[in-house]
Image (cartoon, coloured by chain):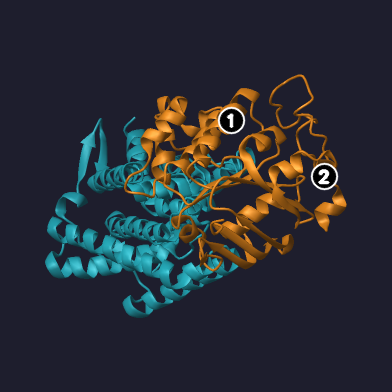
Amino acid sequence: MSEPILVVDGLNGRIAGQQVVEDISFEVPASGVTALLGRNGVGKTSTIKSILGLIDRTGAVHLGGERIDRLPTHRIVQRGVGYVPEDREIFGSLSVAENLRLAERDDRPRRELIERLFPDIHARRAQRAGTLSGGQQQMVSLARALVNENRLLLVDEPTKGLAPRIVDEVAAALAEAAATVPILLVEQNLHVIRKLAERVVVLSGGRVVFTGSAADLLDDEARIQRYLGVHDATDDRAAPAHAPDHDAATAIPVADTTEELR
Amino acid sequence: MSTVLLLVITGLGLGALYFLVASGLSLIYGLMGVLNFAHGSFLTIAAFIGWEVGRRVSDGTWWGLLVSALVGMIVGAVVAAATEYFLIRRLYERHIEQALITVGLALATVALFEGIWGTDPIYTARPEWLTQTTEILGAKIPNDRFLLIVCAALVLGGIVLFLRKTRYGLIIRAGVENRSMVTALGIDVRRSFTLVFAIGGAAAGLGGVLASVYYGYVSAHLGSVLLIFAFIVTVIGGLGSLTGAAIASVLVAVLQQFANFYLGGTGDLVVVIALAAVLLVRPRGLMGKVA
């Protein structure tokens, strides 16, 4: 097996003095999708932000063998890390084209790829990004990460709050991206996880409680119930094929208070 | 009618001065969250050095004024960039310390300027045309107002072009909206901090030289006086909005002129009341982003 692209060792993260990530260690293989799972509030987004240095953190993070946890965020990203944040965080006052131009780090940005993956976005290049629908904004956010050649993508809840049809489009775009770049994916929709992820890392109370293949977790109803507190009805339900976030059958619920504060 | 026209054009001229100071304040706050109380000092030092160089080159001529303006812009830009690099850079996200150091710098520099140039205003020579008036619809408009308006319009146009047509401009516009996301795209946003300070300092520097034309003198307190109104303009226009600063500059200055003329010299009071009204009705200002 090849060397992992990302090694996280003893990572701790703090926001406003409160510990939100506690001694987390895991690895992301150099190919495929690794899903970072857990109930809401267990520290998935904070883990991603800690890796990127967007919040105060301690511990070691290696990217392709190089230690990056002492670098500022922009230097980490320049080493080939694409980031798709939770809630998109597109620049609403800029046009779609300006959002993409801002994200271009390489001399040869992959504009043809973006045009092919997101034709709707390409057609709206002159439109102010703040006037796009939620799904279109998510496409812009994804396009910003995919426009560069990256060594790793950190993708945080890309299907959150999206309509089922858009969820499919996002999943398809991620599947195509995953063919060329490893992805660490935070996702609540188990159907999307089942479709994309090969490995999973499960957090609970800010700690890693399970690491293994996606099949090991998703095929084990008891594990899903224990780690994620959800019944995975992906296989046995009749419809719909992809439920939005609030579908109790597939969406991972909010952690109980004790877990959140632990 | 002629009085109204005179008040409007005089207000536009004064508004131009306010804008030259407020544009930098607004951009600096919008991108970095820094309330720069030392901004008036950039204006004053630029006015003094611009005047010192200009009068030695050719006192009271257009050539001398042009040299003053160029020197003033360069001095303003350099002093502002140095302030960011040596003092402010260490204090991002520490707002109380920022306020303390910029207020301290403002107080110290005024004392320094008084020590060098004295406490009294120094009257300046201007090109003859700027001391004359032009009659428009019966109103005798001082010519220096036209110079101020043209200069401010050029600065506004220049900054807008810079923000819209250059990559640094794109970074600054994005940074005003969401600084951490700009960083997360692999961009060292701090580089643009120094640049924004330099641009703001250059505009303030030009404002300093033009203020000496408008008032007819340079003084250690030139920047302090204009800074108060520039802050009011920045808040009314919406912190971080260049367009808001431009609109508010004109509104505040014209209102001030009318109140001074028709309400017995109450221009300053009316401006403060207008500020209070805007803060009560629309706290984010005319064109500011939602907090």
What is the letter of the orange chain?
Answer: A
Q: Residue at (34%, 43%) from the top-left corner?
A: B160
**Is mark 1 in CB contact (under 8 Å) with mark 2?**
no
Kind of residue sitting beneath label 1: Gly
Chain identifier, cyan in the render: B
Q: Residue furthest bottom?
A: B115
Residue A131's x, y, as percent?
52, 29
As displayed, is residue A18 above or below residue A38?
A: below
Q: Mark 1: which secondary structure?
A: helix
Give the label on residue A223, or none: 2
Callout 2 amino acid: Arg
Classed neighbour count for the residue bearing mark 2: other residues with Cα under 10 Å, few (<14), some (14–19), many (≥20): some
* Screen quadrant of the C terminus of chain A: bottom right
**Which of the chains bears the disc numbered 1?**
A
Residue A208 is situated, as x and y percent measured from the top left of the image, at 74, 56
Outermost residue on the front side: it is A1
Image point (39%, 29%), residue name: A126
Category of crowding for the residue at label 1, using alpha-carbon neighbours closer than 10 angstroms: few (below 14), some (14–19), many (at least 20):
some
Residue at point 46%, 49% (across, down):
A150
How far apart marks 1 and 2 lie (CA) works out to 33 Å
Q: What x and y, as percent, mark residue B268?
A: 50, 50
Of badges 1 and 2, nearer the viewer stands 2
- Of the numbered discs in the image, which one, if any, rests on residue B198? none
How far from the left and from the top, in percent, is residue B274?
A: 55, 43
Q: Which mark is residue A134?
A: 1
Would residue B207 appear left or right of A129 to someone viewing this image?
Answer: left
Tell me the quarter of the picture where residue A78 sits: bottom left
- Give the camera-side residue of A99 and A60: A60
Q: Give the side of residue B132 with respect to residue A120, left or right.
A: left
Instruction: Say above or below: B2 vs A200.
Output: above
